[in-house]
Amino acid sequence: MIQFQLNGKQVSANVRPGTTLLDFLRDKGYFSVKYGSDKGETGADTILVDGNMMNASLMLIHTVSGKNIETVESFAHGQDVHPLQDSFIEEGAIQCGYCTPGMVLAIESLAREKDNPNESDVKDVLAGVYCRCTGYVKPVKAAMNYLATGEPK
Ligand code: FES
C-alpha cells in the first residue's frame, strides 16, 4: 500500500512491486502520460514529481510514496485550459499532440523553478522532450509568450 498526492488529491493504492508509475497512471486513466521508450529518452512520459520533471516509465511506483505527482490532466478544467496550454493553442504549437503534455509540464517546471527564464532555458528544458513531428519552433514561441505574461501556475 502506498500513498501520494496525484493532481492535488490524496491517493492510496495497493500496487504490485515492480509496477512503474507510467503503468499505474495509464491504468488509472491518465492518458496524457505516454509511452516513449523503456529508457526515458523521449520525454513522452514526463510528469512532475514535487515540481521536478521526471520520467514516469523510469520510476517504480513505490518510490513516489509521500510525493506530489502532477500530470497535465490537472492543468485544464473542462474548456478552461491553463494559460500555457492556451498559448500552445494560440501559437498553433500542437501537431499530433503526442509530445505536448510533456512539453507543457517541462515548461511549467521551468517557470516555477527560475525567474525570468530566457529562450535558451526553454530550449534546454525542451531538449528532454522529443517531438517526432519536429515542431520545436512554435512550442518555444508559445513558451516565451506564456513566460512573458508572468502567469505561471
Ligand atoms: S506534436 Fe507530434 S510528437 Fe510532437
Image (cartoon, rainbow, N blue to C red):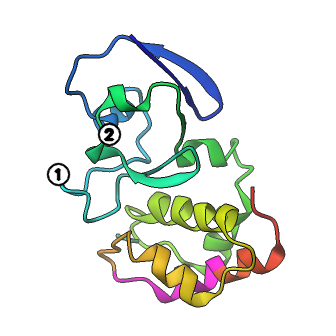
- Label 2 SS: helix
109 relative to 131 in the view: left or right: right
Three-letter residue code for mark 2: Leu
8 relative to 96 in the view: left or right: right
Q: Quadrant of the N terminus?
A: top left
Where does the image place residue 112, in percent across and percent down from the top left? 68, 61
User: Closest to the observer: 39 or 137?
Assistant: 39
Question: In terms of image quadrants, where is residue 122?
Answer: bottom right
Residue 22, numbered label:
2
Q: Quadrant of the C terminus?
A: bottom right
Three-letter residue code for mark 1: Asp
- Label 1 SS: loop
Question: In terms of image quadrants, where is residue 41?
Answer: bottom left
Residue 38, numbered label:
1
Task: Answer few, some or many: residues within 10 Å of disc 2's Cα (few below 14, many 20 plus, some between 14 and 19).
Answer: many
Q: Is residue 141 magenta?
A: yes
Residue visible at 29% across and 75% down? 132
Residue visible at 24% across and 28% down? 19
Q: Is residue 82 magenta?
A: no
The region drawn magenta spans: 134-143
